[in-house]
Image: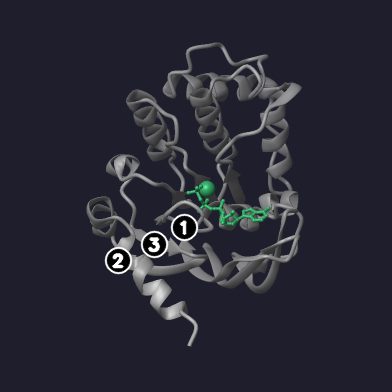
Amino acid sequence: MKNTLAISSLHASTTGGKEILHGISLTVKKGEIHAIMGPNGAGKSTLAQTLMGHPGFKITQGKIIINGVDISHLPPDQRAKNGLFLGFQYPIEVPGVNFDNFLRMAINENQKKGVKKISPLAFRQQLTDQAKRLAFSKNIIGMALNEDFSGGEKKKAEILQFALIKPEFAILDEPDSGLDVDALKYIAKTILSLDYPFGLILITHYQRILHYIKPDFVHIMINGKLVKSGDSSLAKEIEKKGYEGYLNNVSLREAPR
Ligand SMILES: Nc1ncnc2c1ncn2[C@@H]1O[C@H](COP(=O)(O)OP(=O)(O)OP(=O)(O)O)[C@@H](O)[C@H]1O
Ligand SMILES: [Mg+2]
């Protein structure tokens, strides 16, 4: 289906054979924001990494389909070419690689066939504009990828990549972790300022970010499964009551007979 990221009955295991995702189904259309919440160890980051094709996880059942193309067994760069973007919970540092060069390459690499490559000058202008919007305290032109960044700046850099790459679908794994209130606002503002349709999966522990970026759907993940879906009021309920009620349901269902 066009304009859709469809995840169906996805089961994924570590390379050591431990199954972590036990059948995740989720359909994200362009223009929709889906939040995934869940306790530590539920499998949220595993889902993000499995979607992006991290070599540490293996799909054992189910499919990931973008715009009708089955990307389940494609390498990460091919998934990105098909329109997927992954922001890491703990962005990596790459010493010696310039952030701006890396990003320009990534953008040109992701360009559909026939689209003109972005010129270095035009790129720098876009980069400077977005960096200003995100209130980067430093001039990021010429800085090494993530190496010279603080924790919060790494998160901002991830959103900067999102804003410039303009993917059709993105999974952001805790983009709000370790951010001060102002940085959180800048990140939300940047995401909301993107003027093209995209589908977003936002993994978060807190409702804080959802005040700024209101999700259309909220899903709760427990033990590698989505156990409940609802609208943004579900996030408020979780903040008040926690996951305990859901945990009990799961353990009852999974208790040996
Ligand atoms: N490479 C691995 N080998 C073995 N177990 C793993 C591996 N990666 C993750 N796990 C396990 O899978 C489960 C899910 O981990 P994951 O990081 O996906 O959780 P999460 O929902 O993102 O948690 P958090 O909210 O703390 O970020 C955990 O029990 C974790 O220990
Ligand atoms: Mg995680």
Asked if the residue under mark 3 is in contact with the one under mark 1, i.e. CB atoms within 8 Å, the reply is no
Circle 2 SS class: helix
Residue for badge 1 = 30
Task: Tell me which amino acid carries mark 2.
Answer: Gly
Mark 3–mark 2 distance (CA, rounded to whole Å): 15 Å
Q: Is the distance from the Cβ of mark 1 to the nearest ligand 2 atom less than 8 Å?
A: no
Q: Amino acid at mark 1?
A: Lys
Name the quadrant of the N terminus: bottom right
- Give me the C-alpha separation between circle 1 and circle 2: 32 Å
**Residue lying farthest bottom?**
257
Q: Nearer the viewer, mark 3 or mark 2?
A: 2
Residue at the outermost front position: 257
Q: Earlier in the sequence, mark 1 or mark 2?
A: 1
Q: Earlier in the sequence, mark 3 or mark 2?
A: 3
Give percent across and percent down for residue 67: 59, 65
Quarter of the view holding residue 11:
bottom right
From the viewer's perspective, is residue 126 above or below residue 86?
above
Q: Position of residue 145 (x, y in %)?
A: 67, 24
Count neighbours of disc 2 (C-alpha within 10 A) and say few if under 14, some if 14 to 19, many if 20 or more: few
Left or right, 71 with respect to 237, comes to: right
Q: Position of residue 48 (x, y in %)?
A: 57, 53
- Tag 3 residue: 219
Give above or below for 213 relative to 43.
above
Q: Residue at x 56, y 11 (%)?
A: 139
The quadrant where residue 166 appears: top right
Q: CA distance from mark 1 to mark 3?
A: 17 Å
Q: Which residue is mark 2?
A: 245
Specify which label sits upstream in the sequence, 1 or 3: 1
